Image (cartoon, rainbow, N blue to C red):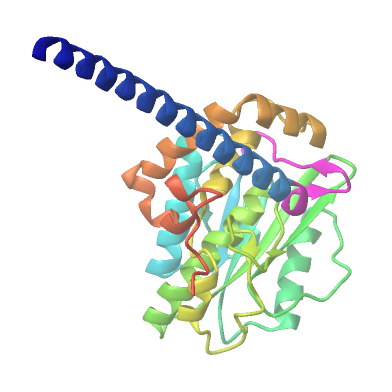
């Protein structure tokens, strides 16, 4: 009698275990499906708001040349530039290593991206406009507006040869090492990323999921910057979605697709893009380029930025 009872008990226990495993598998599958759906939705929203211009997604051609000129880069500025370009060169072969020149005239004539390094004491609307105008004049283009005295970029697309010329002015604060390392280095990465990806700033009132996202309401600009407050509500390095986009645009030889084609390409290759991005983000060589609060397992859904 006891053996019969034990056998029945064992059978019920096995049925319970099997049922429990089936329930857990179903819940996990549903959870993963929901997470994937949310990630896709949020990334497509980012594409539309940050990269879509006049119904198009623009990308650069193969063999992109960068010239860093004017001021000698200090160690923080050069580290930020070199780290970012190391990622681009290793993972996306279309980017050539940056060249450092003493003046604009020494930059190659086929330069695509100009990085003008300036002492922050020289930065003004007038000096910035003159610098940008000189760059565009090299390509027979005209800058018809005055620029704001800040870090920033101007992208001009020549209709004649469909060539994109970018100009970035980066201010260096040589006598305030801590200030520069904390605020300016993340900003340099942001401007470089925007120039490469051809994206624009997006004001957000919710947790940011990209370096394009900025919560400006709770971060008052001006000097001196309150970096602690900026860091609390904004990414201080790249997010997972930023690498997703670079993979989508520069991950293969396919270029200059329509906006709708890029959407279809993303949806068809979502899993491989996500997997490739995670490998890049986990690479120790790039650890300083990512904000862990919006990359890795936190990409696009579990971001911890903005928590009170």
Between 204 and 167, the one lying in front of the other is: 204
Residue 187 visible, this orientation: yes
The spot of residue 217 in percent (x, y) is: 66, 79
Between 188 and 64, the one lying in front of the other is: 188
Between 195 and 275, the one lying in front of the other is: 275
Q: Which residue appears at 25% of the width and 22% of the height?
A: 13
Q: Which residue appears at 76% of the width and 53% of the height?
A: 49
The mark total stands at 0
Relative to 118, residue 249 above or below: above
Part of the protein shown in magenta: 48-63
Residue 258 visible, this orientation: no
| Image quarter of residue 59 | top right
State the quadrant of the N terminus. Answer: top left
Asked whether 56 falls inside the magenta stretch, the response is: yes
| Image quarter of residue 134 | bottom right
The spot of residue 128 in percent (x, y) is: 71, 75
Relative to 89, residue 126 above or below: below
| Residue 268 as seen in the image, left or right of residue 52 | left
Asked whether 240 falls inside the magenta stretch, the response is: no
The spot of residue 109 in percent (x, y) is: 69, 48
| Residue 280 as seen in the image, left or right of residue 13 | right
Q: Outermost residue, front direction? A: 1
The spot of residue 302 in percent (x, y) is: 50, 53
Relative to 207, residue 83 above or below: above
Q: Outermost residue, left direction? A: 2
Q: Which residue appears at 57% of the width and 48% of the height?
A: 242
Q: Which residue appears at 53% of the width and 76% of the height?
A: 230
Relative to 4, residue 162 above or below: below
Between 186 and 195, the one lying in front of the other is: 186
């Amino acid at each position: 009698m006891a053996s019969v009872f034990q056998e029945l008990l064992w059978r019920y226990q096995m049925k319970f275990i099997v049922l429990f495993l089936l329930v857990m598998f179903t819940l996990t599958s549903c959870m993963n499906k929901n997470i994937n759906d949310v990630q896709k939705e949020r990334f497509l929203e980012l594409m539309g708001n940050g990269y879509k211009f006049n119904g198009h997604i623009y990308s650069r051609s193969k063999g992109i040349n960068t010239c860093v000129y004017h001021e000698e880069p200090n160690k923080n500025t050069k580290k930020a530039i070199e780290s970012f370009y190391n990622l681009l060169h290793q993972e996306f072969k279309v980017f050539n290593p940056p060249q450092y020149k003493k003046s604009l005239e020494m930059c190659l004539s086929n330069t695509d991206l100009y990085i003008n390094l300036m002492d922050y004491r020289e930065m003004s609307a007038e000096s910035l406009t003159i610098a940008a105008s000189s760059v565009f004049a090299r390509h027979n283009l005209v800058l018809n507006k005055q620029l704001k005295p800040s870090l920033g970029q101007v992208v001009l697309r020549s209709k004649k040869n469909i060539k994109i010329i970018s100009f970035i002015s980066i201010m260096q604060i040589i006598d305030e090492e801590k200030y520069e390392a904390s605020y300016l280095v993340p900003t340099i990465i942001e401007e470089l990323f925007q120039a490469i990806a051809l994206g624009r700033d997006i004001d957000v009132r919710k947790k940011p999921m990209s370096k394009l996202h900025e919560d400006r309401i709770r971060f008052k600009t001006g000097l001196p910057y309150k970096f602690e407050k900026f860091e609390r509500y904004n990414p201080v390095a790249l997010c997972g979605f930023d690498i997703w986009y670079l993979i989508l645009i520069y991950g293969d030889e396919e270029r200059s697709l329509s906006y709708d084609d890029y959407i279809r390409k993303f949806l068809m290759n979502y899993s491989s893009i996500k997997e490739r991005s995670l490998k890049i983000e986990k690479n120790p060589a790039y650890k300083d380029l990512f904000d862990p609060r919006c990359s890795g397992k936190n990409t696009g859904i579990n971001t911890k930025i903005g928590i009170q």
